[in-house]
Amino acid sequence: MSDKGWIVGWAAVVCATFMAPRVAMASVVNVALSADTSSNRAALPSFPTSKAVDGDLSFESRWVAPDFGSESNPIWLKVDLGHLYPIQEVGLYIPDGTDPFYFGWYVDYRLYSSPDDISWTQIADGRLITRDDPTDTLVLAGLSAKYLRFDAVGGTHWAHLGEITVLSPEADPVPEPSTLVIWSLLGTLGITVGWRRRRSSAA
């Protein structure tokens, strides 16, 4: 009976170390697919923010806000991943369709990440050009985020984005700090109870 406390304690420690962070490594997953989205500007009715995370790369499936973004007044698209994820790669894409009228148009952007929708960190900037350079692939290391925000800060066309993909090397979210704290406290409590029982038995 005196060993039960030790068993409970070490079981909790094992859970805190392995089970809470992750049971096993999974394949790379696009955690932005069908995620919740929002913007600081109303989109054109046929091109809502959800079109930027639907997995469709066609010209008809894109987010468009009928205004130009600027450095001082960006137009942003925010993606809520639902949980804090380790981010391996972010892909950005704008389609050009078949009309030459759209060829060569560009959007200047800045990309931000946040764990809580309060504090934001710029992680990239660049220019997406239809037909010539429509895709940016951003390889990231050591980044975990729950939110990503695409800021259109200039360009020759209204703020728009065809698709944003967010690849995570693990299908399950990173555990919140509070979860790890609870597991650690359970481990400490179990070990303490076991130690006290061992002392009582020895006495």
Image: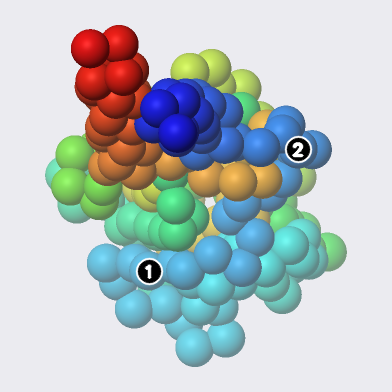
Residue at label 2?
A: 26
Residue at label 1?
A: 38
Examine the image and state in which quarter residue 170 appears: top right
Q: Is residue 110 left or right of residue 86?
A: left
At 52% from the left and 45% from the top, the residue drawn is: 173
At 37% from the left and 69% from the top, the residue drawn is: 38
SS for dot 2: loop
At 31% from the left and 57% from the top, the residue drawn is: 75
Is residue 13 visible in this depiction of the protein?
no
Examine the image and state in which quarter residue 129 appears: top right
Count up the numbered dots. 2
Tell whether label 1 touches label 2 (CB within 8 Å).
Answer: no
Q: Is residue 114 left or right of residue 101?
A: left
What is the crowding at mark 1: few (fewer than 14 residues within 10 Å), some, or many (at least 20)? some
The colour scheme used here is: rainbow
> Mark 1 or mark 2, which is nearer the start of the sequence?
2
Q: Nearer the viewer, residue 41 or 2?
A: 2
SS for dot 1: strand
